[in-house]
Image (cartoon, rainbow, N blue to C red):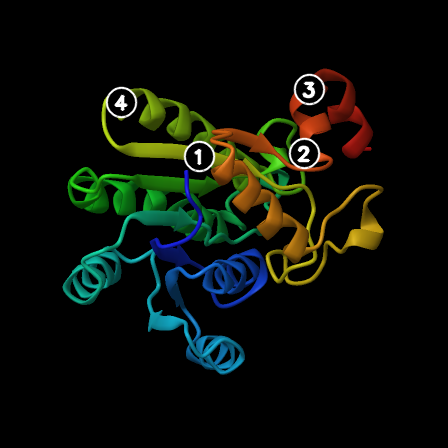
Amino acid sequence: MKTSGNTVLITGGATGIGFALAEALVKRGNIVIVCGRRREKLRVAKAKVPQLHVRICDISLPRARTALIKWVLSHFRGLNVLVNNAGIQHPVDLRKGPRDLPQADAEVFTNLTAPLYLCGLLIPHLRRKKQAAIVNISSGLAFTPLAAVPVYCATKAAIHSLSLSLRHQLRDTSIRVFEIAPPIVATELAGGRRRPKDAEFSMSVEEVASGIIDAIERDNYEAALGAAASLRRGRDELFPMINR
């Protein structure tokens, strides 16, 4: 698939992987719309890359999702690529009973429910495009979970499963479905707790963005980047190693 001349919506696009991808796609001549929950982060992103189109939106909220898609389709009829990138991660210790479950709700709504609904809202539009794509950002932890963040890992495993099903359902349409699984990356995802120095193998946000673009260009529909490839291959061996 081509990686220029598209109109792209990236959720969680003001920071981290989303912003690095947005910046790279703008440089390639794409129209890029990013949304996020925090107005200030969007303002900073726009200042860094003035060509970006920004919209404040908490995609975990049904009304906000619907309003976002209505706004996008009224202003950017050429939209042909959706990148489901927004995600949150919290420690959830079920040994403590229900204490952490409100955080678990937030993870499920943001990491799984929102991408599912955004796909549903946009697929009728995307099917009318000659070339279109849905790009789901999962994680190496979809294949080998980190037990300290079980809900995050479960939502990413669900995104992997959803991507397989979507790819099959849309096989006779113009929509290509990509799943990109990064390894540990230095972002705000876990409140800055997980940094590259905490892992033997990691990638920068720029490297991940480059890997996403490369996968799209090559029609590599399921791309595990860097150390995530090992997590996909060696689940039984690696699970006890990362959960000591």
**Which of pointers 1 and 2 indicates the residue nearer the eye?**
1
Q: Earlier in the sequence, mark 1 or mark 2?
A: 1
Q: Earlier in the sequence, mark 3 or mark 1?
A: 1
- Mark 4–mark 3 Cα distance, whole angstroms, equals 26 Å
Q: Which residue is depicted at the point 47% across and 31% down?
A: 219
Q: Which residue is depicted at the point 51% across and 80% down?
A: 44
- Mark 3–mark 1 Cα distance, whole angstroms, equals 19 Å
Q: Earlier in the sequence, mark 4 or mark 2?
A: 4
Q: What crowding class fits label 3: few (fewer than 14 Cα within 10 Å), some (14-19), or many (20 or more)?
A: few
Taking depth in this image into account, of 1 and 86 the one nearest to the observer is 1
Q: What crowding class fits label 4: few (fewer than 14 Cα within 10 Å), some (14-19), or many (20 or more)?
A: few
35 relative to 195, above or below: below
Dot 1 amino acid type? Phe
**Which residue is the site of mark 2?**
228
Q: Which residue is depicted at the point 50% across and 45% down?
A: 98
Q: What crowding class fits label 2: few (fewer than 14 Cα within 10 Å), some (14-19), or many (20 or more)?
A: many
> Which label is found at residue 178?
1
The kind of secondary structure element at disc 1 is strand
Q: The C terminus appears in which quarter of the rendering?
A: top right
Q: Are marks 2 and 3 in contact (CB under 8 Å)?
A: no
Q: Earlier in the sequence, mark 4 or mark 3?
A: 4
Dot 4 amino acid type? Gln
The kind of secondary structure element at disc 4 is helix
Q: Earlier in the sequence, mark 2 or mark 3?
A: 2
**Which residue is the site of mark 4?**
169
Q: Which residue is depicted at the point 28% across and 39% down?
A: 131
Q: The N terminus appears in which quarter of the rendering?
A: top left
In-image side of 191 versus 220 (left or right): right
Q: Are marks 1 and 4 in contact (CB under 8 Å)?
A: no
**Which residue is the site of mark 3?**
233
